[in-house]
Image (tube, helix red, strand yellow):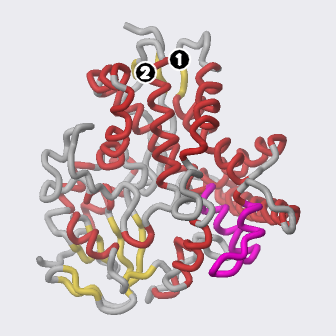
Amino acid sequence: MTTTEMPGTLRRILDYSSRADPYPLYAELRETPVARQEDGSYVVSTYRELTQLLHDPHLSSDVRNLARPMPSAEGGGTPAFINVDPPEHDRLRRMAMRHFGPPHTPGMVAGMQGDLTAIVSGLIDDFAGKEQIDIVDDFAYPFPVTVICHLLGVPREDEPRFRLWVNDIINSIDYDPKIDPKEKLENGVRARQDLREYIGGLLEQRHGRPGDDLLSRLANDDGPDGRMTDAEIVATANLLLIAGHETTVNLITNGMLTLLRHPEVLQRLRDEPGLVVPLVEELLRYEPPVHIIPWRAAYSDIAVGDTVIPKGSQIMLMLASGSRDPNRFHDPDRFDPDRRDNQHLGFGSGIHLCFGGPLARLETQIALTELVRRLDRPSLVTDPPPYRRSPVLRGPIHLNVEQGAG
């Protein structure tokens, strides 16, 4: 494996003009699995090398291990466990998972199925009388916010404020200093601060008052690892909200777009609702919600194939490229819900495997099943649809669909 300069391909992938279809560019990138860039960073694009790195203990998620410092994603707040390394990462993740999944709360996500179905049904009910709907604004965007508010124990009357904060934060992720007003970034910073203060206020009310919501459980839990500090709980809640929200929005929207482009699969899902489980797994491979982990750091020199990545180097992991690697997946550019051995990288891999993955899967399974069942002969208004600016969290910003067409 040779290490070469490949700035052109990466620059085109990151350019907005490629957002609708970056996959041919990923194929170019895979010709050099580990590519050194002009700035000294490394881009990794093939399945074998990606999985090796994702499981390598010398790969760091802590910005302090970069030779060239960069700002924390938390904007000054306590970092979430996704941005720290073991053993601190492992401790915080264990404490969070005690209340989010097995082995301590094995039925937590499955037990939400009734509530999730009710929320989805209510949103689809609001489509009545509309010839055209926006799957993003009218459905995929409000759905996970409502779910996470319910999960955290946010009072219903506060949900509108919560949605405004989420909107400002997500918009700031797409900030482009060349075309966007500075207020877009400032609104995101302010929303993060307001959200931290709001969740901190909810936590104060939960101490000594155990309840069923996640904030109450975290605030009153004295497990084997002790109890999270309030700052750690706020960081965990923010992680669940921001990462979980945008991932689910993109997965649902990409899923509906893919089904409308493959009407034979849409009809099959309508006839065979059980198909939705492998179908969502194939979506996570074929049109994943997260395309790139924009940076990781090398704790020490890391050998990847024939390349040695020096200590302190920034490493960009092209997950979506790895999930379309023909050396790992047969006919990778074909959408195949019957695909076997589908060990995709849609939720990452290794110790940072997506914390909210089980919930996002269930939300998407219910959402797509009900959309397909209840929409009347849906068809795309525009293809390709307009996309969000981010190449990292990739998905349409709008997905307009007509009902009763054809």
Amino acid of disc 1: Gln
- Whether residue 222 appears in magenta in the rendering, the answer is yes
- Between 222 and 268, the residue placed more toward the observer is 222
Give the image location of residue 204, x and y in percent: 86, 66
For the point 33% across and 76% down, the residue is 55
Residue contact between numbered discs 2 and 1, judged by CB atoms under 8 Å: yes
Extent of the magenta region = 215-241
Compared across the picture, whether 119 is left or right of 320 comes to right
Compared across the picture, whether 32 is left or right of 237 comes to left
- Between 361 and 394, the residue placed more toward the observer is 361
Quadrant the N terminus occupies: bottom left
For the point 60% across and 72% down, the residue is 80
In the rendered structure, find residue 132 and report the number of the disc placed on it.
1
Quadrant the C terminus occupies: top left
Compared across the picture, whether 117 is left or right of 197 comes to left
Give the image location of residue 119, x and y in percent: 64, 32
| SS category of the residue bearing label 2 | loop
Amino acid of disc 2: Val
Give the image location of residue 373, x and y in percent: 45, 20
- Between 271 and 50, the residue placed more toward the observer is 271
Give the image location of residue 277, x and y in percent: 37, 39
Compared across the picture, whether 310 is left or right of 103 comes to left
10 Å neighbourhood of mark 2: few (<14), some, or many (≥20)? some
Number of numbered discs? 2
Q: What's the magenta bit mostly, secondary-structure-wise?
A: helix
- Whether residue 54 appears in magenta in the rendering, the answer is no
In the rendered structure, find residue 381 and report the number of the disc placed on it.
2
For the point 55% across and 59% down, the residue is 101
Quadrant position of residue 264: top left
- Between 216 and 89, the residue placed more toward the observer is 216
Q: In 3D space, how far apart are the residues under numbered discs 2 and 1 (Cα atoms)?
A: 8 Å
| SS category of the residue bearing label 1 | strand
